Amino acid sequence: MSKSSKSGANQHHLITRANEANKLLKEHLEQDHVVRVISHNDADGISAAGVICNAITCEKGKFHVTIVPRLKEEVLDKIFQEKYEIFFFCDMGSAWTQKIGKLKGDAIIADHHQTIDSTEDQETVVHVNPHLFGMDGTRDVSGSGVTYLTVRPMGHYELTALAMVGAFGDMQGNGDITGINHTIMQEGIKKNVIEVKNGLKASFLSEEPLYKALSYTFLPPLPDISGDFDGSKTFLEKIGVSYETKFPDLSNEEKDVLKTALVKLNPEIFGKIYQIKDEIPLLTNISDYSQIIDACGKSKKYGYGLSICLGDRKESLQQGMNFLNNYQNTVLKGVKWIKKEGSVEMDYIQYIYTENKDIKGFMGTLANIGLDLKLFNPDKPVLAMSRMDPLLKISGRTTLLNTEKGVNLGQALEQASHSYGGTGGGHTVAAGAVVPRNNQDNFLNLVDDIIKSQIEDEESNKSKQITFS
Ligand SMILES: [Mn+2]
């Protein structure tokens, strides 16, 4: 347990920094200043905005929130025109500390991405990011979690639920809940907000007919069932369970048969399920909740996602479910496409490319799913590319195992995109880039080279135990 005690010390430093942020936030709320919230447009970013906006509401304060796809120069330039005393950046901002430091008001950055701008002291910025304290922001805490830490001293423990919704949205909920996520989860459980049960970790298991629930399940992946209605029906017919039935309507005997058969396919299907206690059935399961918010984000209807986080259980939730259904159908189409097309393999990477409008927006997700379902070679990072004339949009995904071998996609895509007139960056396992389309081949070759040297460097450094911090 030496690892956990070290991470405990690091957590302490992060929490101290988050407390500073809280102090600053409180000072502004006491002066009745409107908090200008800017957050990211994915499930984690939307949940993070939900955390801070709920906390401000509980404190009887006011906020003005905007959700943006990326914190670009133009976005910041617009924010520079605004006259607020306090700015709050969630799930983004760490790459812009210098510029944010020049805002007229104070600023809090609650981020968990590894790309960090020069961190010279910016007097007006409180920068909260696990990477500043040698912690892993890919796995151990989400933007929502970091945001939660900044409001934690106010004691609104019900927000642990949203913090975890964000973590699940950033894929930190599969497998063991570790690091700060674990700390926040335990707080939620202790404060009676979250409960843990053992059960089948299938999506919308109580809401959907069994074959759909199983096909919609990608974490954990179920070979031949995930993303495949026909495969799911065949599986259920084979074990003699009616596929149209909903799980709660099965007899205990049928439930056992199903569990045994699924565990054979993937043992991870049975395990801990995290539920929000005081919540409507549709949103009780934290994983399902995050999928609905994710669907709002992916459909570019951030407002509905945020409204759900802020408590709307009627219109916004209805809309969210529509987005989710559309999204699920698209994913099913995408899985079919991957099964048919496969990827193009280079020496150290592989890629897929589409011009299909329906699939375009979901390439990162499809890359993940393809890796999980082993439809791609798990040894090589996947670059999922789509045409956005005159640009090429790239979503890179790899496995944790590959990052342990030295692969850092965030770094690779940042470096390669900058070399060819684009931009990019992200986490070690998941990153993105945009480059001019006519540089596609050069870009791919360079990424291939960079990944190669990352792996070789790691091999030669292994005995030296060099760590970056
Ligand atoms: Mn995030």
Image (cartoon, helix red, strand yellow):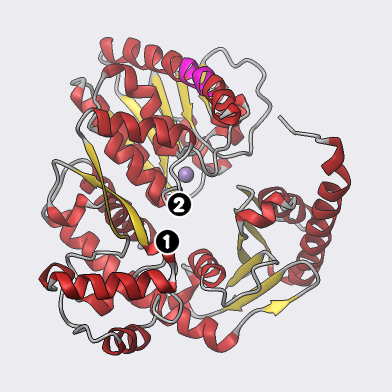
Mark 2 near ligand 1 (CB under 8 Å)?
Answer: no
Mark 2 — residue?
175
Badge 2 or badge 1: first in the primary sequence: 2
Q: CA distance from mark 2 to mark 1?
A: 8 Å
Determine if the magenta segment contains residue 272: no
Question: Is residue 222 toward the left or the right of residue 426 in the image?
Answer: left
SS for dot 1: helix
Give the quarter of the figure containing the N terminus.
top right
Residue 72: mark: none
Please provide percent x and percent y for residue 269: 37, 63
Query: Could you tell me the amino acid type at mark 1?
Result: Glu
How packed is label 2: few (under 14 Cα within 10 Å), some, or many (20 or more)? few
Q: Residues within 10 Å of mark 1 (few under 14, many from 20)?
A: some
- Contact (CB < 8 A) between labels 2 and 1? yes
Q: Is residue 432 above or below residue 358?
A: above
Residue found 45% across the figure and 49% down from its top: 170
Residue in the foreground of this view, choosing between 23 and 9: 9
Image check: 348 left or right of 271?
right
Question: Magenta part of the protein: which range?
Answer: 11-17
Instruction: Report the residue at 62% width, 61% height from top.
Output: 396
**Relative image position of residue 195 (x, y in whole percent):** 23, 41
Asked if one can make out residue 220 in the rendered structure from this viewpoint, the answer is: no
As displayed, is residue 62 above or below residue 358?
above
**Residue at 48% of width from left, 15% of height from top?**
16
On the image, numbered disc 1 is attached to which residue? 268
Quadrant of the rendering where the C terminus is positioned: top right
Please name whichever residue, 3 or 437, is drawn nearer the observer in this view of the structure.
Answer: 3
Query: Which of these two is toward me, 87 or 274?
Result: 274
